[in-house]
Amino acid sequence: MDNLSTKAFEKVFVSTFEGDHSGDLQPRQTPGVFYSKAIPTPVKQPELLAWSDELAAELGISAPNEQDISILGGNLVTPTMYPYANCYAGHQFGNWAGQLGDGRAITLGEWTSAAKGSFELQLKGAGPTPYSRRGDGRAVLRSSIREYLMSEAMHHLGVPTTRALALVATGDQVLRDMFYDGRTAYEPGAVVMRSAPSFLRFGSFEMLAARQETAQLQKLTDWTIEKFYPHITGEHKTITWFKEVMDRTAALIVEWLRVGFVHGVMNTDNMSVLGLTIDYGPYSFLDDYDPGFTPNTTDLPGRRYAFGRQHTVAYWNLGCLASAIAPLFENTEELSAALEDFKIIYLEKYYAMMGKKLGLDEVQEDDHQLIDDLEETLDRIKPDMTIFFQLLISLPAAPQNAESIMQHFSPSFYREPDTASLEKLSHMLQTYQNRFGKNKITEDAAKSMMKLNNPRFILRNYLLHQAIQEMEKGESTLFNNLEEAMKTPYSADHDEFFKLRPEWAATQPGSSTLSCSS
């Protein structure tokens, strides 16, 4: 185990690619470079609020001492670190935004361990960079708590994600307009240290294509394949790589849908080329099942990034990545054809995932209609998604009448279904029970499968909102309880949180929807 303050960091990325080494933090365009040097801006009083023992153990990082906490707050940079901000572009809400870049994220370098390889360690909220535009490069406590808890919660759910190592209060106040309506207010500042093998995004490639820096684009693509997809070789490696990025992206979206996660801001600059969940902003888990739900107030009224549209946005974003790397192909027909396979790949993964949630031994073509009927019924009744699937696990094997169905699933209802909806639910479940009875695996094996694929605990927005309110007052009880509960999301160890969202939380800002500043 090594300390952050004594370990020698690697500088592979900054040694490989061209960068701006001036250290000038003035916002500006930076053509021709992949990154810009950005020294973190010191804060008043860094205080460690949370530390991921699990991630630290995986990476071989010792518990932080006083010097380490100074690093986590941005007050200390060791000689082997080279802090920088990445340059990338992106499409935001379907519109080309041009150069974006790390506006409040600063990578310190690459931490290597014998067990896990190389991981970038990055501070989010450590001050301005050349890509901060009109921002201050800082993060507030509420958004930092949300990123720290959710990235670790998603890891324990089994969803590919960036990770969070530490949460640090800065002792400074940060001015924010939370709802973009002119009501600015000072909030406590914080910094999250997050990690990933790489934070490269679709937008990293879009930036180079937009600037027609084809040689740089080829260099980044080749390096990405060699470092993160080393099994891909040969003269056709670029198309093979794109297909694998597409496969990983489809798998990621399916995992989001499995647990009821809505990213909220699937811009191309928030899409990882490693297939990771990246950049936790106005996200949410579903409470009541609603394919049209978006947690992002900026996404209203179009609901581009709604729960049920995430796979279509992924396809659109992959199209942007394909366009970005198109200059590397003499003929783009194969690239276009590969992109059109996304729907087939996605649906195959989606139905397979739903089969596991339903405890089916294998998903046959006839099962697709059952799954489609289930989605339609859930959309009509809008039960709590998490609680409904937990109750499905304990549904008696014998077909039930409508009254028994109502009684069994009533703990998941936010409102009582009308007679027609209840009859539809009853009919759908009878069809499901008949299909379940034809499994070639035992009932116990099927139920075990369901328990492994349907979380019992999720980090609901209202719980996060309450934890944030407490932490802003210096109280960490709920935060600590949530941090423990998220480590065993498929067990009944923390059933004090297994209940419907309270009525007040349906409209409470921060508990229902959030802005991009969240």
Image: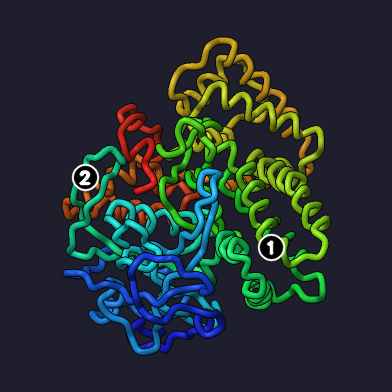
Q: Quadrant of residue 23?
A: bottom left
Q: Answer with the quarter of the image where residue 38 lies.
A: bottom left
Mark yes or no: residue 465 visible: yes
Determine the secondary structure under disc 1: helix
Q: Residue 330 is drawn in which quadrant?
A: bottom right
- Distance from disc 1 to disc 2, alpha carbons, whole Å, reads 41 Å
Residue for badge 1: 325
Residue 166, image x and y in percent?
34, 67
Q: Position of residue 514 (x, y in %)?
A: 37, 41
Q: Residue at x 46, y 38 (%)?
A: 299
Density class for disc 2 (Cα within 10 Å; few <14, some 14-19, many ≥20) is few
Q: Residue 104 location, x and y as percent?
A: 36, 63
Residue 184 image label? 2
Q: Residue at x 31, y 67 (%)?
A: 126
Q: Position of residue 9 (x, y in %)?
A: 44, 85
Give amino acid for label 1. Ile
In the rendered structure, the answer to whether residue 123 lies left or right of residue 443 reads left
| Above/below status of 275 relative to 250 | below
